[in-house]
Every structure is written in structure tokens, then in C-alpha cells.
Amino acid sequence: MKSYYQHLSSIREFGEKENILKKPILRSSAIFPVIHNKFYSSSIHFLGYWLLKRNIPEVTLFITLRNADGNTLSRQTQIIDSAKAFSINLDEILNKINYKENSFLGSIETEFHTTRDMVFPYPALVLEYQNEQFNTCVHTLGRIYNDLEDLKENDDTQVPETGFDIHETDDLKSFLSFVNGPLENEDGIIEYTLTNSNSKKLFGTFHINKINPFETKLLYLNEHIPNLAEFLNNNSGSISLKHNFEGFYPRLLVGNIQKSSPSVSFTHSYYDCTSCVTESDYWSRTDENHFDSSIYIPIFNKNKQFTNLVIYPNMSPSNITLKIDIHDKNGKKIIENSNFLKIDSSEKKLTKINLNEIISPDISSNDNLAAHVIANFQNNRIPSRIKFGLNVGNYESNFKLPCNICFNMRMGNPLIENKPGSFHWAPIFSERNTVLALGNFSTLKNYKKTANLEFNFYRIEDSSTFSETISISPNSEKRFSTDDFDLKNFLKTEGWVTIKADSPYIHGYYFNLNSSGSISGDHIF
């Protein structure tokens, strides 16, 4: 793990001093565990955003398919020279190589190469597992390092991976998956700390034996952790995983599988910072006009939907007072609770907050509501990495697993005030009832700026595009779906939207409200 300040410098965050010795990023890569079986398959989606965001006219993409043992089965090259939607479909690749088996476990590695600096060594891709009734999505996670300098920078501090939900019942099974790098691991070892819904702990270690170069591992936790279902007791828990993996960026694909309605809900793991106590692990409060940190969250409250905020035991030691304000679609604050929850992170509790229960019964469930979650820390001990979970689901659906979005709070950074705007993008799946939720919330305590947004829509069939504009009042959100902007006629299968805003504080999420009742989603890029 590199320090947060080093991360801001490396991605050229606005206002940060640039390292003149930093090498340009000419290779941006990602590697994903992929599955094909009788229930669901895998695909990868992306937008040719380099042409829009970096003015790079052409990108070369190498696609490598490997089996579970790490053996290469296929290599393809593609030129990205238009700003349109693209996808990589596992079934299509398997058909091209005449793969005859009924099931497949392996990996797809994507390597994007240019002659101009791409800034980020990891590209903005979306991994999807899907069948006709469900889909689940997560952005880029693991990658193979570009060189030794890249490896050293990211392995500066070794911490466990955590920050996601696990279930274990007769119907639900938790898993983790990853693709090894180029180095053989003689014996993969994982030490775990399990936390149940009552914040009780269970510790242990298990071995996964030799891991070949580029081998794909899919591990079901109940096969390695005795009495897992009994310990979780029909409730979701969380787990921290300390490992000895080397030679690749070890962000894990993690989630749960449902048997009765065959489906998956996954997300990515995140740093366990409970042992991170150096000066660089904390953000300095430099301006009292800003909250220490805050984040906007959309509340889904219709047709038996629920919205839960999950606070995992993963933060650097600190004492927090959590404030949650509820705003209506016009930005009016309708509920305020300055001392909603006090957290002593040293207690390492797993906390779940049902945001729907905060809402007054006399508020119509047809209203779109947004929560502004504000964290105030004691003694200027503000963890620089604060990751929560956002679960949106449906109580009456046969699909029991909500989405489990891993997202970070925004630091109160006065340098951002001078940033003229922001650029974002998100996928749209026309047959998945995609809803995009965008919020205009700031860490500024007295925020009053209306944000003007320009949307540009792209599709996979060709380079056609069209634009729309909207404005969002301060402390409010807007949502749109394929029912808006005549999108159903434009998007035949899938596409993307870019969002150009004249405010640096725009943040958002996309959700796929499948007609079956299954809900998936992630935060926008």
C-alpha cells in the first residue's frame, strides 16, 4: 500500500505537487478472474475515455485469456481509436478457440499501451458476471505491476485486505478470488480475522498450497474456516485477510453466491488500516470551513427497497462522531442528527445503519432522498483512507444479495475549492434498468453552488453520440435512467455516459435495478 499523500501525487490530484521524477504511464493494465458455467458468464466493459480525458488519439489493447492453471489460451490485439463503448465477452473468446467444456475458470488480462502518459497504471474497466435475471459489477481490481519501481511503490506498506460483506447459510456462500502475478508462490498463506454482526471475533490461518504464475484462485471461505455458518448465525459479517501474495496488486474479487436463484454479488476488497498509525496515515485538518470528511449516498426507498450503510472495522485508530443529514430532491434538509453515532475504532466493531429507518413515516416513499454522511474526528486524527459499504437491495426479491459497493469518503481538502470542475463516466446497461444517481454535496460547511452538468452518451454499436445538460442544486441529487433523454431508442444494448461538471464536488453511483428484483451497482468513475 502506498501512502494516501503519495497516491494523490501519483494521480496528479488537483493542487498536489507533482513529482518531476515520476515516469510516464505508457502501460495501463488489469487482470480479472472470469467464469463461465451453466448459470452465468463474464464480460468486461469500458469506454474509449482516453480519447476524451487525455486527448490520446489511439490506444492499443492486448487481451490475454488464461485458464485456471495460468496457461495462455488466447491473445488478441485491438486498436481503440474512437470514443465509444467496448466490451470483452468471455463466451465469444471461448467460442473462437473452440473451447468445448461446460464450465471455465480462468482470467482475462487487459493491457492498454500508448505513446503518451495515461497517468493511471490501472484502466477504468467494469467486470460483470451475468445471466438474464441478474448482473453484478465492479470496477478494475487486480493488476500486474509495470516494473520493479511500480511494485516497490505499491508494496511500501503491507496490510491485510478487508471491507466487504460475507454470508454463509444453506443458500448463500462467500468466496474470494484473485489472479496470481508472474511469481510462483510455494505456499499461499492467509491469516484471517472474522467479525460477525455482534462484532465478535474469530481468528485463524489456512494454506492454499502452491500458486502457479498467473494461476486463478477461487476460494470458498466455508472450505477453509471451520464453523463459519454457525459463527455468522444467518447474518452478514466481515473478514480481514492477511496474505503472503507477491508480484501483483492484490486487490481481491470478493462476494457471495446464491444457490436458490443462481446469482453472484461481488465487490473488491480494500486496505485494512487498523495498524496504520504513521503521520501519513492521517489527514490534517487545515481549514475549519470544511468538514473533516463527508460523502453523499442515495437512498432507495420504493417497492420494498432498502439502503444500508456498512461501517467496517478497517480504519486507522480514531474517534468519530458521525452526522447524517437527509435532503429532499430540492436540497432542503429534512432530517438532521449531529450526533447520530459515536465510533471508537479501537473497538473494531462492525456497524450496519439502515438509512430507511431514519426517514420519518410521513415522508412519501416516492420521493428521491439523499443522505449526507459527515464524519468529525477528535484531536485532528482524521484517517486518510475511510472506506464504507453501500448495500441496496429488495426485501421481497428472490435474490437475497444486495449490491455491496465499496466507496470512500471525501477528505475536507481546501485545495479542491480552486478546481474548476470534474469529469466522470459510468456504464449504462439498457436491459438492466440502469439508474444513475448524481449528488452535488461538498465538504464545505456552507456550500451554495449549483452545479451545471453536460452529459454525453455513447453506445457500443458505433461512434454515434448525443448530449444533454442539467443542473443540480447544492445539497441535492438527481437521478436518471434509460426512460430519460430518449435513451431507450439510442442504446440498443449497452453504452456509457460522460459527465462534465463545473463543480469539483459531483459524486455518483450507478445501479442496475433488474426486473427480476436483483440489484447491482458501483460508484462512477
Image (cartoon, helix red, strand yellow):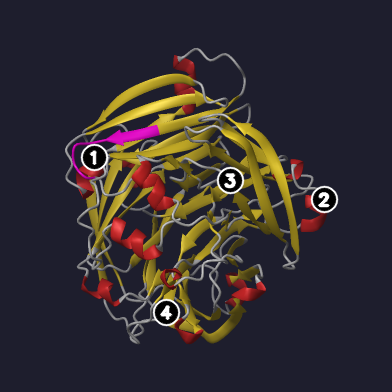
Residue drawn at x 34%, y 46% as measured from the top left = 149
Q: Earlier in the sequence, mark 4 or mark 1?
A: 1
Q: Which residue is mark 3?
A: 244
The reply to whether the magenta stretch includes residue 111 is: yes
Element at label 3:
loop
Boundaries of the magenta span:
110-117
Element at label 4:
loop
Judge the density around disc 4: few (<14), some (14-19), many (≥20) Cα neighbours within 10 Å: many
Left or right of 291: which side holds 264? Answer: right
Residue 334 in the image: x percent, y percent? 48, 83
Q: Nearer the viewer, residue 204 or 290?
A: 204
Element at label 1:
loop
Residue drawn at x 56%, y 29% as measured from the top left = 212
Residue drawn at x 41%, y 72% as measured from the top left = 329
Q: Earlier in the sequence, mark 3 or mark 1?
A: 1
Judge the density around disc 2: few (<14), some (14-19), many (≥20) Cα neighbours within 10 Å: few
Residue 366 in the image: x percent, y percent? 51, 67
Q: Mark 1 belongs to which amino acid?
A: Ala
CA separation in Å, label 3 and label 1: 40 Å
Q: Are marks 3 and 4 in contact (CB under 8 Å)?
A: no
Q: Which residue is mark 4?
A: 292
Q: Which residue is mark 1?
A: 83
Q: Which residue is mark 2?
A: 227
